[in-house]
Amino acid sequence: MTGPIQRGYFAIGAEGISKPMNLGNLVRSANAFGASFVFLIDAHYSVKASKSDTSHTHHQLPIYDYPGVAELDLPRDCALVGVELLDDAVDLPSFRHPRQAAYVFGPERGSLSPAMVARCDHTIRIPTRFCINLAVAGAIVMYDRVRSLGCYPDRPVAPGGPVPAPAGMRRGRLP
């Protein structure tokens, strides 16, 4: 199964992640949604040790491990987007995703460090009443990115089936 053509690239990262199941689910989702790489900052577990990554992402995508925020090394022109429940963060449905982006999530029982928030080019929040599971949050952000940048036709006004694709477009893909 292939997805639509997308311009640019994205990466998924986590700071201070400590639960192997969340880590495995996050990297598996990153692989499924077409991430170019995964990065970890101050991770407590190895991706390879996670039993929940049944797609064996560590054999398919580069996974970079950094000891701290200062060592994080992203490609030039790659925007760092922090995902956190901050008062001044942009709500995800209103956010225009950069073409080259690295999304970073905080630990399960905490938040992104002040150093990481300061390093981010953008901060976004998923409009929920309280924190949600890290892997679920990652999947929501990746879905929103694919949906908004993936050359899909607009949704119909009325409930139900798809709007006919514009000329030259087939199932979310350009010719």
Image: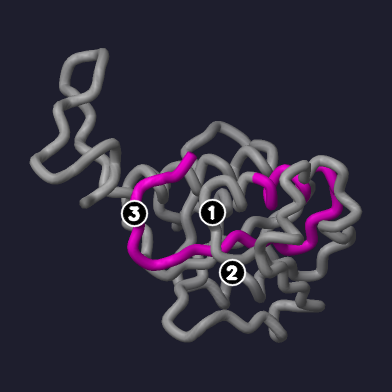
Q: CA distance from mark 1 to mark 3?
A: 32 Å
Question: Residue at 71% of width from left, 85% of height from top?
Answer: 71
Which residue was labeled with disc 3?
5
Left or right of 9 in this view: 95 = left
136 or 32: nearer the viewer: 32
**Vertical placement of residue 11 versus 175, above or below:** below
User: How far across and down, in percent of the image, does residue 154 sit?
Assistant: 20, 35
* Real-space Cα separation, disc 3 to disc 2, in angstroms: 31 Å
Label 2 SS:
helix
Position of 35 compared to 116: left or right? left
Which dot marks residue 117? 2
- Secondary structure of the residue carrying tag 1 is loop
Query: How many C-alpha atoms fall within 10 Å of the one at disc 1: few (<14), some, or many (≥20)?
Result: some
Decide: is 15 above or below 31: below
- Disc 3, SS: loop
For marks 1 and 3, give the one nearer the viewer: 3
For the residues labelled 1 and 2, say whether their Cβ atoms are less than 8 Å apart: yes
Residue of label 1: 86
Mark earlier in primary sequence (3, 2): 3
Numbered marks: total = 3
Q: Amino acid at mark 2?
A: Val
